[in-house]
Amino acid sequence: MLSMRRPSFITRWVKLPIELKELIFSFLSLSDIISFCDVSLPFRLFALEYLRLRLTQLTEQYDLSLYTLMLILDRSNTVISGSVALELVHPTGLRPNNLDFFCPNQEADGVCSFLLSKNYNIVVDPPVLPLIIDDVPGHNCIDAVTTLRHGTKQSTIHVIVSSSSSPLAPIFASHSTFVMNFISASGIYSCYPGLTEQNTGMRNITDKLVPVQPRRLLDQEKYVQRGFSFIEGCPPLSGRCPHPYGESCLHRPRCLIDPITAVLPLDAFRSSCSFWPRTEWRLGCLLKLSGGDIVTAETLIEVHSDGTDTRMHGNNLGRVSLAERAILSTITLT
């Protein structure tokens, strides 16, 4: 039955006017577009052309052509994340207020210098008080944040500098799974597509020693006002019983090539793409100790190209107890 319907769909799609095709695509999520691309090469070419147009529309206020954007991403191993990436993988009609570049720690000067040559000027953002953790270099895998504003258009770009050689570390240490999407020079990624496409997500605990992180609370509230809602993740992990595995599992280590992540290569002739350096993450989660106590394990990020002493990233490395490590090392997933 499916094989009979497919030619009919292709025939009808070809006959649609381009305006209607673009209207349909304006409602499709990244997962839907990936399925569309699998129909045939012409379908994939159309989808990629539309996504390039969509990205151009989302970033036109920044006075940077699509070619220039891709040049930045390619030459500095930088990615675009935040509201622009979210709107690309899950269209809601929102017009992002700023453009967020995430770059490796060794590429920050080059990215900022290039933007300065494009009529951007560095401005100082007022701090969000109290300063506790949001503005401390290195916390939440952010070494620094530079804000630049265009000289005539007044559009704002943030350059978020990773504390690692991977620009992805701050993304996986962000406040929730809503924003764990990004655009690289080679592809578009959504790390929690099933949740994000339902306007839901999970909070990410990155520091159990700091009860309040003001900037993160503001960011979370911003997305709630945009129609997103938070769900509870999986139950506390115990070393004594199997643990259900799915997209809402907080304990399972994740990577960009696992079955959950939605990835669309920007090269029409490639069926997959990877990102270097290899970056894995585990969200902040709850553990149940043998005595029955429930404890929090913070977000942990591993970058395989960093040195053996610096490949693990988190806010309080070394504060995981032996009991907590024993549970994480004996995890049984079903």
Image (tube, helix red, strand yellow):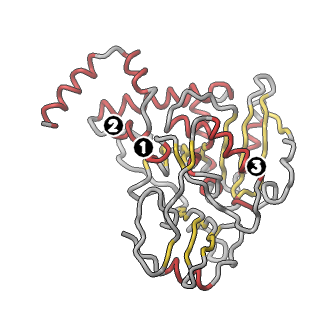
| Quarter of the figure that contains the C terminus | bottom left
Determine whether the residue tagged by mark 2 lies in a helix, strand or loop.
helix
- Determine the residue positioned at 44% across, 36% down: 29
With 330 as the anchor, is 87 left or right in this view? right
Disc 1 residue type?
A: Leu
Disc nearer the start of the sequence (3/1): 3
x, y (%) of residue 183?
A: 54, 43
Residue 111 spot, x, y in % from top left: 71, 45
Q: Earlier in the sequence, mark 2 or mark 1?
A: 2
Q: Which mark is residue 215?
A: 3
Which residue is denoted by mark 1 in the rendering?
264
Of mark 2 and mark 3, the one earlier in the sequence is 2
Whether pointer 2 and pointer 1 mark residues with C-beta atoms closer than 8 Å, the reply is yes
Q: Which residue is mark 2?
A: 37
Label 2 – label 1 distance at C-alpha: 9 Å
Decide which of 74, 170 is in the foreground and name it: 170
Residue drawn at the location 72% of the way across and 37% of the way down: 157
What secondary structure is found at the residue carrying circle 1?
Answer: strand
Q: Which one is in front in this view, the residue at disc 3 or the one at disc 1?
A: 3
Please state which of residues 222 and 318 is positioned toward the viewer in this rendering: 222
Q: Secondary structure at mark 3?
A: helix
Task: Give the vertical position of 139 relative to 197 (above or below).
Answer: below
Amino acid type at circle 3 is Arg
- When asked about the image quadrant of residue 306, the answer is bottom right
Label 2 vs label 3: CA separation? Answer: 38 Å
Depth order, front residue of 73/176: 176
Residue 199 vs 155, above or below: the answer is below
Mark 3–mark 1 Cα distance, whole angstroms, equals: 31 Å
